[in-house]
Amino acid sequence: MRWVRNLEVIGEAVKGVPADVARFRAAGRRCQDSIGLSLDLRVFFGTMNRGVDEREKMQRRQYRSPPIEEAVCELRFLPNPEQDFAAPARFYEAIRNDYPAKPELQALPPSELTVEGKPAGFQVALRGQGGKILFSNGARTHLVGLASNLLSVHMLRPYPGWENFRPKIVQAIEAYVAAASPKGLSRIGFRYINKIEVGQENRPIAELLTIGPLTPEAISLDKATSFVRVEAAYPDRPARLAVTVASVEPSKPGGAAMLLDLEVSQEWPSEQPLPIAETMAAIDEFRVRERAAFEAYITNHARKIFDAD
């Protein structure tokens, strides 16, 4: 299948990453595996703040009009057994200068499907996660989300680039670790939501993307909506790539638009969570994998639309 070949291409594109990750993790091991933000951990985050690996910068393709609608880095933490109800207030105090707008409450989608009862009268239910508090920079281009054991960092259009997104992630993690003292991470989800404006309604998806629904030539269709989702595991580490392609409302009448939603994620067991000191190394690697996936799933025609440098 075409998406399997794309995943092989993605795997080839990220070869060489483990060496960089090993370097970052070696730095992380020198950090104290302790609760709170120790001096060593500050030094570690300072190292991570100095920038993305120069090799990754050189390989990354730049676009004058990138299709990114939203970039999201979501982190789930393993909580400290000694729960501190003042942690959210301390977190907000640490970030409020950069996110001064009034906080908003956002409902989180259901996280668990449960089936109860016997076959003759079973019930299916979705278990909710409660709400998430969103802190905004005022213009709603930069946001931070906070919920129970969850932290998310968002960048919306116009996307300012990874060089600006990455420091925001580091800042939020530093503030969360200092406020909540988590034991480690149970999940990282790194997601880019792209909106590709087609320009005309009947242009084939294959002109823009290497993944998508195939319409038989024997069937004549003037207009159709589509939705495709693929999930696959990476062969070199227990991470997953989720790809969603769907038709969405265009920005201009008479046109058409496609959504290309890419998420690289990994989960860790509660008995062996990801150490805090290794968080940014994992995020940097997921960023490389997500960009490799994006380039694998778009065509040269799409690149012309994005106006590549």
Image (cartoon, rainbow, N blue to C red):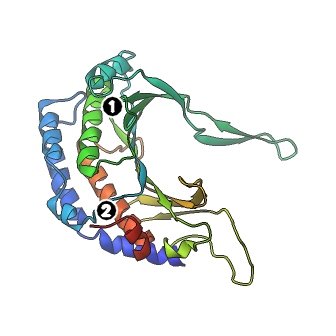
Which x, y percent locates residue 224?
Answer: 69, 65
Q: Quadrant of the N terminus?
A: bottom right
Q: Look at the image and tell me whether residue 232 can be seen.
A: yes
Label 1, label 2: how far apart the Cα atoms are: 38 Å
Q: Residue at x 75, y 79 (%)?
A: 219
Discs 1/2, front: 2
Residue at far front of view:
253
Q: Is residue 183 above or below residue 207?
A: above
State the mark number for residue 249: none
Disc 1 residue crowd, few under 14, some 14–19, many 20+, Cα 10 Å: many
> Is 296 on the left or on the right of 121, as rendered?
left
> Is 299 on the left or on the right of 18, as rendered?
right
In the foreground, 232 or 307:
307
Q: Residue at x 64, y 63 (%)?
A: 226
- Residue with the mark numbered 2: 63
Element at badge 1? loop
Q: Residue at x 31, y 71 (%)?
A: 13
- Residue with the mark numbered 1: 182
In the foreground, 107 or 300:
300
Element at badge 2? loop
Q: Quadrant of the C terminus?
A: bottom left
